């Protein structure tokens, strides 16, 4: 089975900090995604990547950036964390026949 | 833009009952439809994937059907158990990695 691993389950960061959320998949998939999930708003796509060093903006990229230096790793970066970025962050990969999600990172910005 | 709706938003049933969750989408031009389960505070677990050319998929007590022309899918859960309590999400893929999620159905199975 495909495994998508998010390194942190819970994170608490201070406003203004630079935050890195890490995601690793073990099946050599080209497509990887970052979503955030908020009550009443559902899942919203932040960024996605088709291949190494390639990235595309999703629906809500403001305040975020991404890095994909190796095929298996896709990092989400909050350049200067703000309280409105408190959320559940979900990483996913898709080889073309279905999405596999990680277990999520609950980020709280105080 | 694709819109995905799930009805009901919440459902409570006694253990052992068979149940159906509904998903509807507005644009029938989809590549596939995927059903997920999400436990509180956790990520999404894929349950079933139906390609656009398929009518149904089965896994254990779960059966998902797809009627692309009418924009509907159902997830049938047989002999429900308390461990089935979770939120169930459907999502449709419309190409170029455009995945649209439904609003979810929160299921509670009462022992």
Image (cartoon, coloured by chain):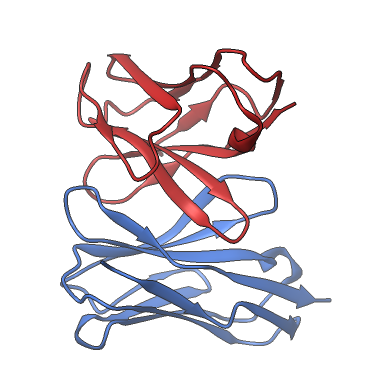
Q: Chain B's colour?
A: blue
Q: B2 or B48, which is in the foreground?
A: B2
Is A81 positioned to the left or the right of A1 in the image? Answer: right
For the N terminus of chain B, the quadrant is bottom left
Task: Point out residue A77 in the picture as x, y percentages from the top left corner.
Answer: 46, 20
Q: Residue at x 69, y 46 (%)?
A: B41
Residue B29 visible here: yes
Is A4 positioned to the left or the right of A97 in the image? Answer: right
| Residue B11 quadrant | bottom right
Considering only vertical position in the picture, is A108 above or below A39? Answer: above
Task: Point out residue B51 in the picture as x, y percentages from the top left corner.
Answer: 22, 65
Q: Residue at x 24, y 40 (%)?
A: A95
Q: Residue at x 35, y 47 (%)?
A: A99
Residue A73 visible here: no
Q: B84 or A91, which is in the foreground?
A: A91
Considering only vertical position in the picture, is B12 above or below A21? Answer: below
């Amino acid at each position: 089975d495909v495994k998508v691993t998010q390194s942190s389950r819970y994170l608490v960061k201070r406003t203004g900090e630079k935050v890195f959320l890490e995601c690793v998949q073990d099946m050599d998939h080209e497509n990887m995604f970052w979503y955030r999930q908020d009550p009443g708003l559902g899942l919203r796509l932040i960024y996605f990547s088709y291949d190494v060093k390639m990235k595309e903006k999703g629906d809500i990229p403001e305040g975020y950036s991404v890095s994909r230096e190796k095929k298996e790793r896709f990092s989400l970066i909050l350049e200067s964390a703000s309280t409105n970025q408190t959320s559940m962050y979900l990483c996913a990969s898709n080889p073309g026949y279905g999405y596999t999600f990680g277990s999520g990172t609950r980020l709280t910005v105080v | 833009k694709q819109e995905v709706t799930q009805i009901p938003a919440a459902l409570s049933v006694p253990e052992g009952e068979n149940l159906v969750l509904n998903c509807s989408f507005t644009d029938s031009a989809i590549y596939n439809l995927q059903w997920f389960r999400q436990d509180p505070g956790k990520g999404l677990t894929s349950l079933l994937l139906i390609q656009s050319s398929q009518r149904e998929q089965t896994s254990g007590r779960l059966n998902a059907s797809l009627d692309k022309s009418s924009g509907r899918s159902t997830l049938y859960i047989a002999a429900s158990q308390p461990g089935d309590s979770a939120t169930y999400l459907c999502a449709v893929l419309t190409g170029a990695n455009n995945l649209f999620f439904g609003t979810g159905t929160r299921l509670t199975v009462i022992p």
